[in-house]
Image (cartoon, grey):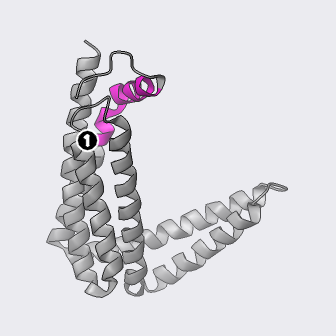
Amino acid sequence: MSQDTNPSPLFRDALEFAKANWWMFLLGGVLYILFGVLALARPAEALLALAVIFAAFLLVDGVFSVVRALAAKGADGRWWVFFGGLLSILVGLYALLGPVNTVLLFVYVIAFQAILFGVTVFMFGVNIRKAVSGEWVLYVTGVVSVLFGLLLVWAPGIGGLSVSLMAGAWSLVIGILRVLFAFRVRSLVRSATR
C-alpha cells in the first residue's frame, strides 16, 4: 500500500503515540506469549490462577464502582454504577469462595473478551489500511480471536483444562502477532521520521 503524503491529524496523533510507545505493543505481545507458555505447560494451575485473579478483579472493580457511585451525589446513572458494582462484588466473592466453580463463568468472560478484542483489532486494521502496509496482521489477529471466542461460546463445557490449553494457544498466537505488529509499528515510525 502507498503511504499517504498528507496524513490526517488522527494519523499524526497515532504516529506520535507510536513513536513514544511502540514498545508497549511489544511488551503486551511478550506478556501474551509468557502466559501462553504457562497455560500450555501447566494448564490446571493456569486456569485456577486465572479464576482467582478474575475473582479479585471483580471484587476490586466492584468496590471502586460502589465508592464512585456513592461519591457522585446527584449524578445521572449513579445507581446503575452502584448496582453494577454491587453485583461485581457478589460475583467476585462467589468466585473467591469457589474458584473451581467459576470456570464456566470464566470461560464466558474469556469468550466475550476474545470476540470483542477480535472485532476491535479487525476494525482498527480496516481504519488504518490506507496509511499502513501490513495490516493483514491485524485482520488475522481479529479473525483468530473471534473464532476462538465463538468456539468457547459454542462449546463451553469442553472442560477447564481444555479451556486453559485453548487460552494458552490463543494467547501464544496473539502474542506472536502483537510482537510482529510492534516491529511493524517501529519500522513505520523510523520511516516516517526520516
User: Is 186 positioned to the left or the right of 119 in the image?
Assistant: left
The residue closer to the viewer here, 21 or 144, is 144
Report crowding for label 1: few under 14, some 14 to 19, many 20 or more residues within 10 A (C-alpha).
many
Q: What stretch is highlighted in magenta?
A: 10-26
Query: Badge 1 is on which residue?
Result: 26
Q: Where, by quadrant of the figure, is residue 190 drawn? A: top left
Query: Furthest residue to the top?
Result: 194
Amino acid residing under circle 1 = Leu
The residue closer to the viewer here, 61 or 83, is 83
User: Is 182 positioned to the left or the right of 89 in the image?
Assistant: left
Residue at left offset 39%, top offset 83%: 104
Residue at left offset 33%, top offset 69%: 149
Where is residue 29 drawn, in percent x and y?
25, 48
Residue 17 among magenta residues: yes
Residue 74 among magenta residues: no
Asked whether residue 161 is in view, the answer is yes
Quadrant in which the C terminus appears? top left
